[in-house]
Amino acid sequence: MNQNLTEYIKKYVAISKKEIDVFQSYLKPKKVKKKEFLLKEGQFCKSRYFITKGCIRLFYIDSKGNEQIIHFGIDNWWITDYESLITNKPSTLNIQAIENTELLELSQETFDQLCERVPQTERLFRKIMEKTYIAAQKRIEYVYSLKGEEQFRLFISANPEFVQRVPQYMIASYLGMSPEFVSKIRAKIK
């Protein structure tokens, strides 16, 4: 039984030990090495992933060939390409490990069965989706209302663990800035 996942679930829903055991029985442990892909553009996303240890990025390649990072995931976060997962269409995104990463995989194939056996699962994932949506709204708001330096300062104050674990050029991509601009801001802050 993964204690971190148990604590994570209990933050969102009331659930018994027996239901936790059933929930965890649907998860498959998986390890990916640094730079290894969980999903590549054009593939079908078939699972949700709970990160037990490590760091992952969700990104696409734009028309100019640049990586555009949409989302990061670290210890005790879920990550997936929901559009491909829900619509059963090929992904336009990539999911790649930034560090050697340990995951628990929940396949979409068994998700409905899990929801029937542990009804709180639907509520759990609804709450996760709500939280994810709010974060996406805030990110859009910050892009339009804050200057680059303000965005960077807000990002590092809200996510100090990323500064230690994610390369600077990836943080720049996520924030829609050049690595050089982020480097200048970091030098100014120190």
Image (spheres, grey):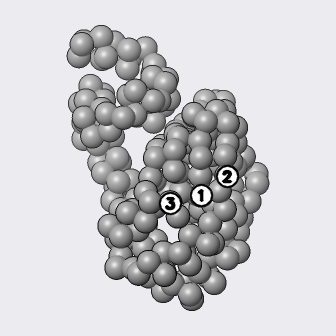
Residue 25 in percent (x, y) is at 61, 72
| Gap between marks 3 and 2 measured at Cα | 13 Å
Q: Residue at x 46, y 53 (%)?
A: 77
Residue topped by disc 2: 30
Taking the image as shown, residue 111 lies to the left or right of residue 90, namely left
Taking the image as shown, residue 57 lies to the left or right of residue 64, namely left
Residue 4 in percent (x, y) is at 43, 57
Kindly check if marks 2 and 1 are in contact, taking CB atoms under 8 A apart as contact: yes
Mark 3 or mark 2: name the one nearer the start of the chain.
Answer: 3
- Categorize mark 2 by other alpha carbons within 10 Å: few (<14), some (14-19), many (20+): some
Residue 90 in percent (x, y) is at 73, 59
Q: Quadrant of the C terminus?
A: top left
Residue topped by disc 3: 2
* Kind of residue sitting beneath label 2: Lys
Residue topped by disc 1: 104
Q: Is residue 71 above or below residue 23?
A: above
Disc nearest the viewer among 3 and 2: 3
- Categorize mark 1 by other alpha carbons within 10 Å: few (<14), some (14-19), many (20+): many
Kindly check if marks 1 and 3 are in contact, taking CB atoms under 8 A apart as contact: yes
| Gap between marks 2 and 1 measured at Cα | 6 Å
Mark 2 or mark 1: name the one nearer the start of the chain.
Answer: 2
Q: Residue at x 44, y 52 (%)?
A: 76
Q: Secondary structure at mark 2?
A: strand
Q: Is residue 138 above or below residue 84?
A: above
The residue lying toward the viewer, choosing from 135 and 72, is 72
Taking the image as shown, residue 165 lies to the left or right of residue 99, namely left
Q: Residue at x 38, y 53 (%)?
A: 136
